[in-house]
Amino acid sequence: MLPAHAASFGEDGQRSTRNRVARSILDHGPSTAAELALRLELTPAAVRRHLDSLVTDGVVEPREQRVYGSRGRGRPAKVFALTDGGRDAFDQAYDKLAADAMRWIAQTAGGGELGEAAVAAFARARLAAQAVGYREALEAADPEHRTEALAKALTADGYAATARSAPVGEQLCQHHCPVAHVAEQYPQLCEAETEVFSRLLGTHVQRLATIAHGDGVCTTFIPKAGSAPDARRTSKTTETSKTTTASASTAGRNPA
């Protein structure tokens, strides 16, 4: 559990440099001290002091940096990612209520496969409602900017999303997930989201990683028109191939 002084990052907390560091990691995903210093216009030494405090308080944790493509010489720079407790300090106060509601849906439907099907139907209905606004954003954008338009629409809903180029396509990265803890128990939420992305973008998409699955960022690969997605080419990382080849049917599932 977080100490009292680290338990919340509300609007008042944004004035704190230390909380700005945590918020930057939330918005942009796992970051190095150098990236944070550049982003926040602070000295690297100042950022490291704040990171040390955040690590001590259990808000962030150091990790080995993921490397896309061929790794160069030398050890990868250390990155800092939010812990589960750090994410809890932001806007996930309704996680227990949401999880209880999902559990009620599953039990009311009869449990087992029937319960899972009911949860999946709820997840699809929920995402379909959200997708109405996303579709309007995509229709107003040029075809080559549709992924970026989707990222902006997701950001407006609290997902802190970005779009970036990737080999033979693009990657849609969601640095925050308001329902991450619920999705750990009910991966149907991640699966429905992946299906909606595919329909909105008019192409098969591939979920490479999810916050609910323990990754620092939810990452979805969108292939270029006419190119077949190949997980071996599009997601060469230092992580296991099990994570990088996750499909829509398994995205967000806990290994346990």
Image: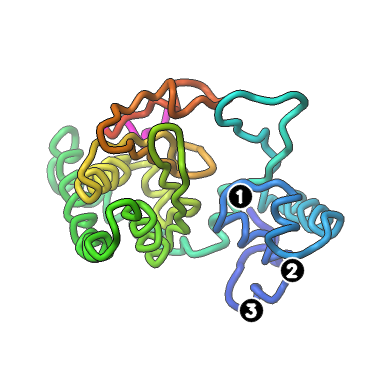
Q: Which of 83/224 is in front?
A: 224
Q: Which residue is mark 1?
A: 82
Residue that sits furthest to the right in the current view: 45
Q: Which kind of residue does numbered mark 1 sit on?
A: Leu
Chief SS of the magenta region: loop
Q: Which residues are magenta?
A: 249-256
Q: Is residue 56 above or below residue 152?
A: above
| Secondary element type, mark 1 | strand
* Picture coordinates of residue 95, whole percent (x, y): 41, 57
Earlier residue among tags 1 and 3: 3
Mark 2–mark 1 contact, CB under 8 Å? no
The question of residue 181 being in magenta is answered with no
Residue at 86% across, 55% down: 45
Looking at the rendered structure, the kind of residue marked 3 is Asp
Q: Which residue is mark 2?
A: 17
Which quadrant holds the C terminus? top left
- Mark 1 is surrounded, within 10 Å at the Cα level, by few (under 14), some (14 to 19) or many (20 or more) other residues, namely many
Which of 170 and 112 lies nearest the eye of the viewer? 170
- Residue at mark 3: 12
Nearer mark to the viewer, of 3 and 2: 2
Q: Position of residue 226 (x, y in %)?
A: 25, 32
Residue at 39% x, 24% y: name it: 231
**Which amino acid lies under the numbered mark 2 shown in the image of this protein?**
Thr
Give the quadrant of residue 134.
Answer: bottom left
* Image quadrant in which you'd find residue 142: bottom left
Query: Vertically, is 236 above or below 190?
Result: above
Between 133 and 234, the one lying in front of the other is: 234
Q: Left or right: 251 with respect to 83?
A: left
Circle 2 residues within 10 Å: few <14, some 14–19, many ≥20 = some
Residue 174: x %, y % from top left? 45, 50
Crowding at dot 3, Cα within 10 Å, few <14 / some 14-19 / many 20+, comes out as: few
User: Can you give x and y, in whole percent of width and height, for residue 5 in the image?
Assistant: 71, 67
